[in-house]
Amino acid sequence: MIRAAILGYGNIGGGVAEVITKNQDQVAKAVGDSVEIKYVLDLREFPGDPMEKKVVHDIDTIINDPEIKVIAETMGGDEPAYTFTKKALEAGKSVCTSNKELVANHGPELMRIAKEHDCNYFIEASVGGGIPIIRTLNEALKQEHILNVTGIVNGTTNYILTKMEKEGAAYADVLKQAQDLGYAERNPEADVEGYDACRKIAILSSLMSGKNVDFKEVYTEGITKIGAEDFLYAKKMGKTIKLLAMSKKEENGYNVMVAPFYLGENHPLYPVNDVFNAVFVKGDMLDDSMYYGRGAGKLPTASAVVADMIQAAKNLGRNLPVEWSDEKETVLPVENTSRAFFVRLDINQVTPQQALDAFGGTLVEVEELSDEVGILTKVMTEKDCKAKCEALKGVKGVIRVEA
Ligand code: HSE
């Protein structure tokens, strides 16, 4: 029997216990031995819970128990998860995490420590919830030069945008629903301001490159400025609005960004709705591929953690190398990237013709909004678009457009 521990018995930690218990037949078949949860670390007690008697409050109980070989870290946040993970790896225990903040902050270091101690730091559940995108990049697509990864990688914001579009629902009401469903982060800012997606695309970019893409260098914009008006224009243009996390390999670095985008019906990410995530991957040999599934929520995320626990249990005493070094990858300045934009303008301050002269492109009008027009601009650099918006009066909002 392989004995494991769970650090943090919240939504995802509870899910890990549930997956291991309910699917113990599958887990045992995959590992070739049964897996039992021996400890659950949490500050709280859980009277009446099936794990009640396994709850401990001191990490050293787990670290000092030689029977524990595999640990699920589902605490979230940087500390104390960082200290606990380091201690566990230094003791030769594999750690399987859903904690993207920790992975984005310390991924290469923790992977190096795992290597030095013949164990593993596995991170499948840190990106894309139940979608096995990490294993796909680390194993199935290892023969490829990955040129482009573009994803909807935050379930909460996708849920919010979908409800706003389909039901005309108000932003605050839908955010509350997402929190009640257990999709949102403890601090909703991390989802709606794009910080969660930023960390996830930094992780994916690092795996694309093999060097470290620092999430602090990734241009990030959330969905807090998206309103009902933007969806009126979307409907008129036959488009939708999605929070995209994208990373494109260029000759001298990576173009990485998180922002809301207008997407046309033919874009592969257009039909990805609700809490679902999808990651589009372009390889130099493979060409286009896409991976789709539940991007947040208790059981899908826990399922990914358990997949890693199986992998860890099958490889006790052996490190499976991951190419993600401490060396810094270049994140290119967003100002030089080019695309079309959708600009909303107050016609009390600027005439449609003046706007068209400035931006080029086409005029879009919607009946419900009599005081404004939209311009779907020609392709221009971010720098150009910003300069034109600053020079022109009456700009009410700008959303990027992905062809
Ligand atoms: N809050 C995250 C999301 C959870 O909504 O995608 C999964 O990482």
Image (spheres, helix red, strand yellow):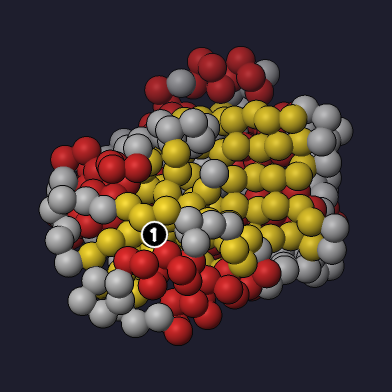
Which residue corresponds to the image point at 16% horizontal and 40% vertical from the top-left?
167
**Relative vertical location of residue 125 with respect to residue 354 in this rendering, above or below:** above
Which residue corresponds to the image point at 45% horizontal and 84% vertical from the top-left?
391
Amino acid residing under circle 1: Ile
**Relative vertical location of residue 120 with respect to residue 386 in this rendering, above or below:** above
Q: Is residue 201 visible?
A: yes
Can you say which quadrant of the picture contains the N terminus? Answer: top right
User: How far across and down, in percent of the image, does residue 158 sit?
Assistant: 36, 46
User: How far across and down, in percent of the image, does residue 264 sit?
Assistant: 44, 39
Q: Is residue 10 visible?
A: no
For residue 186, side relative to residue 312 (left or right):
left
- From the viewer's side, name the closer residue of 254 and 74: 254
Q: Secondary structure at mark 1?
A: strand
Q: Quadrant of residue 49?
A: top left
Can you say which quadrant of the picture contains the C terminus? Answer: top right
User: How far across and down, in percent of the image, does residue 393 sit?
Assistant: 34, 82
User: How far across and down, in percent of the image, does residue 63 sit?
Assistant: 62, 57
For residue 380, side relative to residue 277 (left or right):
right
The residue at which mark 1 appears reads as 375
Which residue corresponds to the image point at 85% horizontal and 58% vertical from the top-left?
251
